[in-house]
Image (cartoon, grey):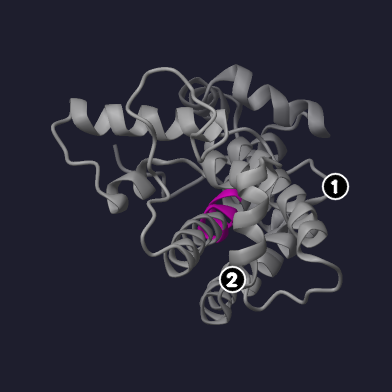
Amino acid sequence: MDYKTFKQLEKAISISRLDTYKNSSSSLNEEVLGKYIWNVKLSENFYFLLKNLEISLRNSIYDAYKNSYPKKSLFFINKEDRYKRKEFHAIGSWKMIKIVKIKLIENEKKATDDRIISELNFGFWTKLLLDNHRNYRDMWRKIFKDVFPNMPIKRNIDKEKKEIAKKIDRIRVFRNRIFHYEPIFNRDDLDEIHKDILDVIGWINCELLFLTEMFDEYENIVISEKEIVEKVSKFGEKDEPSK
């Protein structure tokens, strides 16, 4: 790849973004862009896995709650502006639900459960697992096996919930890096995170795990770095993209 071509691409992508890949190993232009593209490919693949995990987790929690508490709303909050002890939710989750309901009302939409579920972020569902609020302890003891029907219970539910909460929170932090376009290629725990994501999906729904694995290209992408660099090195020699 010639210098002029690289500088044009650097201008489009940004110098600061590509600097991360320059510092990782070599400063050769094709290796810098190769690392950048390789990172994008890894992120794209993880995006698919993470979306399947997030969607299945929130739906499984909601469905399990409704089955166990058919007459109660998971998203009920007191109408008063201030937090009250009698509120079901811990204050962090309470605030998230309140913000979502206000947003829906401002957009002249009815705050139905489906709309609330789609608006609440991954952090809300993770917080339900992480928070040791007394109401959540009772709730999880009742719904845990329905949320994760395929997870082997080796100890009591409280301890299992604590362990999977830490695992999912770690996945959440990793997810945020991808969704904010931050590099992941230089992490040494990608294999472990990849396995954790698939494990949790499988504990929730075996069929979704099979579908996810069918389109999961992680292993091929991991070993494709050299191929990507070689392909990038030829960019600009011929068959340049049309303007």
Secondary structure mostly seen in the magenta stretch = helix
Residue at 31%, 51% in the rendered image: 113
As shown in the figure, which amino acid type bears the numbered disc 2? Ile
Residue under numbered circle 1:
188
Residue type pointed to by label 1? Asp
Q: CA distance from mark 1 to mark 2?
A: 27 Å
Q: Residue at x 71, y 42 (%)?
A: 132
Residue 50 % position (x, y): 56, 55
SS of the residue under disc 2 = helix
Q: Quadrant of the C terminus?
A: top left
Lateral position of residue 115 relative to residue 189, left or right: left
Q: Does residue 58 sit above or below 182 in this rendering?
A: below
Which quadrant of the structure image shows residue 153? Answer: bottom right
Helix, strand or loop at label 1? It is: loop
Task: Please state which of residues 18 and 157 is positioned toward the viewer in this rendering.
Answer: 157
In the rendered image, the vertical position of residue 203 relative to residue 174, given as above or below = below
Q: Is residue 45 magenta?
A: yes
Q: Is residue 41 above or below residue 176?
A: below
What residue sits right under mark 2 in the picture?
204
Looking at the rendered image, the disc whose residue lies closer to the viewer, 1 or 2, is: 2
- Residue 12 horizontal/vertical position (percent): 46, 25
- Expressed as whole percent of the image width and height from the top left, the position of residue 36 reads 63, 39
Residue drawn at (53%, 60%), measured in percent from left and top? 57
Q: Tally the numbered discs.
A: 2
Q: Which residues lie in the magenta part?
A: 43-49
Judging depth in this view, the residue of 71 and 189 nearest the camera is 71
Neighbourhood count class around disc 2 (C-alpha, 10 Å): few under 14, some 14–19, many 20 upward: many
On-image quarter of the N terminus: top right
Q: Earlier in the sequence, mark 1 or mark 2?
A: 1
Quick one: label 1, few (<14), some, or many (20+) residues within 10 Å? Answer: few
User: Which picture quadrant has residue 201?
Assistant: bottom right
